[in-house]
């Protein structure tokens, strides 16, 4: 049995607790730590080397995408899922372009969190289906501008 280790980095204690509560019953997923700030997330990721990092970009105090790339430098095998209340398509694309492999709106945590963690841990990507078309259109716009 391969165990998927998870680090939760979120500014809100309630959000971290929700993630932990949802993942606790999963036999093949273990939460190994929590972080409240970008520095804590970076330090914990470098030390714990989690398979998956659940990252609210607000822990980077406006540098979510930059934080993603910095964390991946220190822990290159960690796979990052962005968590947010409401992120713009541009913010999501920024995080994905820096190396995050998924995005999950916080209102989708109860139904999608465990599936997203398993998918990303296995090498896949996770973006809610309803966003795929918008993100592809946005990517097309960006590619036409370059």
Image: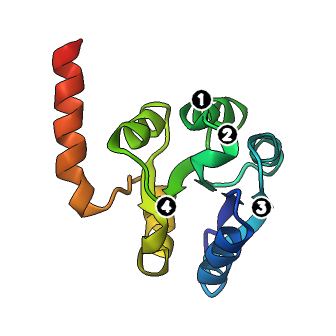
Would you say the residues marked 3 and 4 are in contact, meaning their CB atoms lie under 8 Å apart? Answer: no
Q: Residue at left 24%, top 12%?
A: 146
Would you say the residues marked 4 and 2 are in contact, meaning their CB atoms lie under 8 Å apart? Answer: no
Position of 138 with respect to 99 (left or right) is left
Would you say the residues marked 1 and 2 are in contact, meaning their CB atoms lie under 8 Å apart? Answer: yes
- Label 1: which residue? 66
- In this view, the residue in front, 82 or 47, is 82
Q: Is residue 78 visible?
A: no
Disc 2 crowd rating (10 Å Cα; few below 14, some 14-19, many 20+) is many
Q: How many marks?
A: 4
Q: At which x and y percent is residue 41?
A: 75, 47
Q: Looking at the picture, does residue 49 appear above or below residue 39?
A: below
Q: Earlier in the sequence, mark 2 or mark 3?
A: 3
Disc 3 crowd rating (10 Å Cα; few below 14, some 14-19, many 20+) is many
The residue sitting at the bottom extreme is: 25
- Label 3: which residue? 34
Q: Earlier in the sequence, mark 4 or mark 2?
A: 2
Element type where label 3 sits in the image: strand
Question: Closer to the observer: label 1 or label 4?
Answer: 4
User: Real-space Cα distance between discs 1 and 3?
Assistant: 20 Å
- Label 2: which residue? 60
- Label 4: which residue? 85
Would you say the residues marked 1 and 4 are in contact, meaning their CB atoms lie under 8 Å apart? Answer: no
Which quadrant holds residue 112?
bottom left
Q: Residue at left 72%, top 69%?
A: 31
Q: At which x and y percent is residue 70?
A: 66, 30
Disc 4 crowd rating (10 Å Cα; few below 14, some 14-19, many 20+) is few
């Amino acid at each position: 049995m391969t165990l998927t280790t998870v680090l939760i980095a979120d500014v809100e204690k309630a959000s971290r607790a929700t993630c932990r509560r949802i993942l606790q019953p999963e036999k093949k997923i273990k939460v190994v730590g929590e972080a409240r700030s970008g520095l804590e997330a970076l330090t914990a990721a470098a030390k714990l080397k989690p398979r998956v990092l659940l990252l609210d970009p607000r822990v980077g105090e406006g540098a979510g995408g930059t934080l993603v790339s910095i964390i991946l430098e220190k822990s290159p095998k960690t796979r990052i899922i962005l968590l947010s209340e409401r992120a713009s398509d541009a913010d999501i694309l920024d995080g994905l372009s820096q190396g995050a492999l998924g995005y999950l709106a916080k209102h989708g945590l109860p139904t999608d969190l465990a599936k997203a963690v398993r998918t990303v841990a296995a090498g896949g990507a996770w973006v809610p289906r309803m966003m795929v078309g918008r993100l592809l259109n946005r990517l097309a716009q960006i590619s036409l501008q370059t």
